[in-house]
Amino acid sequence: MKPMTETTPVVEMRNIRKSFAAVQALRGVDLVLNHGEVLGLVGDNAAGKSTLMKVLSGAYIPDEGQILIEGKNAHLTDPLHARRLGIEMVYQDLALSNNLDVTANVFLGREAVSLKLGPFGVLDGRYMEKEAQRLLDRLKIDIPSVRLMVERLSGGQRQAVAIARAMAFNSKVIIMDEPTAALSVAAISKVLDLVRELKAQGASIIIISHRLEDIYSVSDRLMVMRNGRKVRDAVIADNIDDFRERVVAYMVGARDDFAVTAAG
Amino acid sequence: MSIKDLIKAQQHNIREYGMYIAFLVIVIFFTITTKGLFVSSRNIGNLVNAMSYIAVLAVGMTLVIVIRHIDLSVGYLAGTLGAIAAIAIKYWLLPLGVTIPLVLALGILAGLLTAFLVAQMKIPAFVATLAGWLGYRGALQLATRSTGTIIIENDIFNALGNGFIPDIPDIGILPGVHKVTLLLGILGIILFILGEINNRKKTQAYHFEVLTMNMFIVKLIFVSAVIAGITWVLAGYQGLSWAAVILLIVVLLYSYITSRTVIGRHIYAVGGNPEAAELNGISVKKITFLVFGSMGLLTALSGILYASWLRSATTIAGAGMEFDAIAAAFVGGVAVAGGVGKVTGSIIGALVMASLTNGMNLLGWDISIQYIVRALVLAGAVIFDVQTRRGAK
């Protein structure tokens, strides 16, 4: 029984199972994300972390299990549905249109319209530009102009635009898939600053990364997956060296906090 | 925003300016070498009529290439639809009010068929439209087999490609000048200036940067002078042709849709990154149907303009038109990889290619040399495009 004082988690996934043909990608995974929390999600390749996040973002429909968004049962049917419920995914390959400017990317698929002429909605360019600039300012993202084409931005700036877009529409949960992969050291630190800024502004974030030091530096809690199961779920408290050693032990299967449950 | 950033933000416009400059160079070259014949009212009037059906195709082709496809079938489809228009008028005795909507509807249908093959059956557009090229070639021969060339004797239909807008009767002022054309030109300039001022005011109200006042005035004067010049030249012959009016409407409509509406934004989003578009709730399939449907509509319009211009439907009408349209789009700055390219650019591209042909004809250059010159211009334009794009990165 939960104590009455505990607030409802923003996301709760219970006993999620998902198979692809004979492969059991997820074997009954539980996940809890609290309001204003950054949850790090790690695991070796094929541990199931990306599959789990695709279930949460509506890209995959689980075979079994339950998803609660702010305590309410949700049957996510597709990514747009998940997005309407406030779950935003920042994809590893960014999902930006290089040929459009920053504003157009922030509002892609959700353009503001000033006038509706039959099937033609007329873009409200000035409003969107103003809002995009305000968003970047609020998140302290340093891009010279929202009129810049995305193809002219650096990798770190693009990642920032992708993350800003996820924040643009009052989302409840932001899932980031390897936000610091393929970035320079300076850009990584900027992206991590951005994650802290989002958290400070009240966002709830799940961050998948292979870079344990990044997870360590921004996350409140860590969840480790292995072979489609959760093997560790705990608040980050160690120093970085102990943390790394311990996490690796869970990732390679030397330790497992949930072994008994899983066997049963 | 620093000067450097400003230049960076403007970099994509530099390609466009380059094209306008190239066009200007071509015009000046032919004006000098033909001793002014090239810019004579009569020649410019003919040039516009002779390019209009290609330009209309180029507008549609621009969007097709922007969403990373191609359409090889439009030439013979235009020919076939022109033949259907001729048959409808001459043998079915249908009134124009039925014939033209019918042909336009058939064009849309043909475009949707291509879209079905591309978006639904997942056949590469090159192959699907190559099949269309063969099929419509056969259809055109079938339609004209028993009759051969069909002469169209409907004056109103023929006016679309040859006729000029009516003028007010001569009242003593400006004899020999087409006054309605002049008035339309003046109206165009007034609307342009008011629109620019209004736009500038609104943009300033949002505290965004705008051109400096001096640059703004220079821009207004320059564009007004260009409109005034073209108007004056056209007014000196028989005025604005119906083909030019139709082309103008198509260009204004498509520029507006592509640059100012949600659908236009989504077309470019699909061209830039289809996966990203899909993830953001934009249906790539829907956009593909829309773009090929519009291509079909414009192909029908082009077929009507061409048949009207020739006053007949021939057994080989439309042959090679697809390549002229594709070349116009590429010369006009449409990127081969998709996602980039403006409707206005493709019109300039069509103008460049038509001016070359026209100018070289006036100079009496050999046709084989003409092909080679056009080849060099096409390759040169795309090389310039690729280089500036790379330089901008």
Image (tube, rainbow, N blue to C red):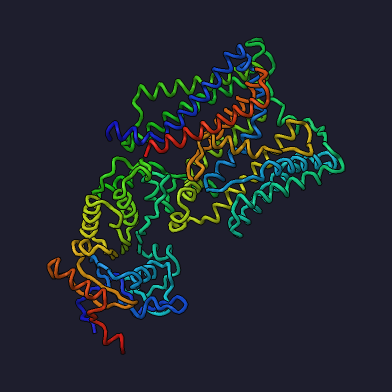
Is A159 left or right of B39, judged from the image as shown? Answer: left
Residue A110 visible here:
yes
**Residue projecting furthest to the bottom:** A264
Is A60 left or right of A233, judged from the image as shown? Answer: right
B26 is higher (above) or lower (below) than A253: above
Residue at the image point whose x is 18% and y is 73% from the top: A246
In the rendered image, the quadrant that contains the C terminus of chain A is bottom left
Is A205 left or right of B131, judged from the image as shown? Answer: left
Marker count (numbered): 0
Residue A116 visible here:
no
Tell me residue B21's x, y (percent). 48, 24
Write down the quadrant of residue A90 in the picture.
bottom left
B219 is higher (above) or lower (below) than A150: above
B147 or B190, nearer to the observer = B147
Write down the quadrant of residue A23 in the picture.
bottom left
Tell me residue B357's x, y (percent). 64, 25
Tell me residue B215's x, y (percent). 37, 23
B82 is higher (above) or lower (below) than A157: above
Tell me residue A236's x, y (percent). 17, 70
In the rendered image, the quadrant that contains the N terminus of chain A is bottom left
**Residue projecting furthest to the right:** B146
B281 or A49, nearer to the observer = A49
Is B220 left or right of A208, judged from the image as shown? Answer: right
B389 or B280, nearer to the observer = B389
Residue at the image point whose x is 31% and y is 88% from the top: A263
